[in-house]
Image: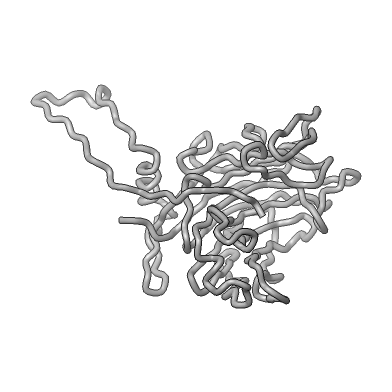
Amino acid sequence: MIRIVAFLLVVGAAMGVGVASSDEKPASSVRKIPLPAPLALAERARHGCGGVLMRPVGHSLWRCVLSDEFDGSRLDLTRWSVVTTAADEFSSGIPPAYACYIPDPRTISVAGGYLRLSVVKLHDEIQCGGAAAQPTKYIGGAVSTKNRLAQTYGRYEIRARFPTDENPGLQSSLILSPEDYAYGQSSGEMDIAEYFTKWPRRVIPYVRYDHPGDDPTETSETCKVDGPDQFHRYALEWTPNRIEAFVDGRRCLSTTWSKGTLQRPAPFDQPFVLSMFEALGVSKAAFDLDDPPDLPATMQIDFVHIWGVRPN
C-alpha cells in the first residue's frame, strides 16, 4: 500500500476583473491574468472529461472534477504531484533490485498527447534517500493527486497501455489510496487496474480491506485484455454501497465489501487520492536480476477523467 497524504481540494468562486476605456487597446497589449491554480483546475475540468461534464449516479449528480488529456509538453503540477522515495517513502522491487522514485525526465514525461511513466536502469548507482538506505541502479516514475484532489466517492476513467515482456518483474499500477489513513492499517485501498508481466493477459482490480476469511468479490480473474500493450480504458465507480471496476466498458468486479471488520461503508467513506506508477514487481511477480525484463519499461496514459461531488 502506498502511504500518501493528500488534502481535499476545495474550489471557490473567481472574481471577474474588467477594464473600462474609451480607446480599445490592441489585443496583443492586453495581459491576461491567470487564474489561481485551484480555480484553473476547476475551469479546465468544466470543459473536460471527454465532454461528459456530469454523470447521474442514483439520486446524485457527479461532476467532472479533474480532466487531463496530456496535450502539453510537461506535467501539469496544478493537477499532479510527483511521488518521490525521499518525500513519500515509496519504492518498488526488492533490494538490491529496487526502484527509487525521483523527478527525472527519463521516468516522467509528457509528449505527443501522452504521459509516460517509466522504470529505467542506470549505468551507475545513486543514493536514493528517504526510507531507502542503500544505493540502487533503478529509478522509477510515479504521480498522484496528492495535495491536488482527494474525494470520497466518484468515477475514475484512465486510458492506458502497459509495457509487456516475456519475463516477469514489471508492474503497472493505477490505484486509489487513503488521504490520511483514518482507520490506520485498516484504511483500505482500491486498485483500479494493476498489470504484471507475470500474468500476460490479466489486468487485476482489487478492493483491499480488512476482513476475516475470504471475500471472493474483492478481486477478479475475469478482467482480461487482448494486448495490454495497446490502449484500453480502465475505470472504477465508487459509491457508499458498491465499488465496481470496468475494462473497456465491461464490468468485471463488483463488491459491497460486506465482510469487513469495520462497519460498512467504512473504510471507504474517507477521501482517497489517485496514484499512477510503473514499478518493479515483488512476491510471485518479483523482478529477477538473473533473468530480467527489458528496461526501460514505460506505461503510457492517454487521459485521466475523474467525476465526483464538487462544491458549487
The residue at the point 42 percent across, 70 percent down is 57
Q: Is residue 161 left or right of residue 120?
A: left
**In the image, residue 122 lies at what x, y percent?**
77, 31
The residue at the point 54 percent across, 69 percent down is 266
The residue at the point 53 percent across, 56 percent down is 272
- Say which of 307 and 211 sits in front: 211
The quadrant where residue 134 appears: top right
- The correct choice, above or below, for 146 with respect to 284 in the image is above
Q: Is residue 311 visible?
A: yes
The quadrant where residue 212 appears: bottom right
- Say which of 4 and 242 sits in front: 4
The quadrant where residue 119 appears: top right
**In the image, residue 27 lies at what x, y percent?**
24, 27
- The correct choice, above or below, for 117 with respect to 234 in the image is above
Q: Is residue 191 left or right of residue 8?
A: right
Q: How many marks?
A: 0
In the displayed orientation, state which residue is furthest to the right.
Answer: 290
**In the image, residue 211 lies at what x, y percent?**
67, 72
Q: Could you tell me which quadrant the N terminus lies in?
A: bottom right
**Colour pattern of the rendering:** one colour
Q: Is residue 192 visible?
A: no
Q: Is residue 44 left or right of residue 288?
A: left
- The correct choice, above or below, for 6 with respect to 265 in the image is above
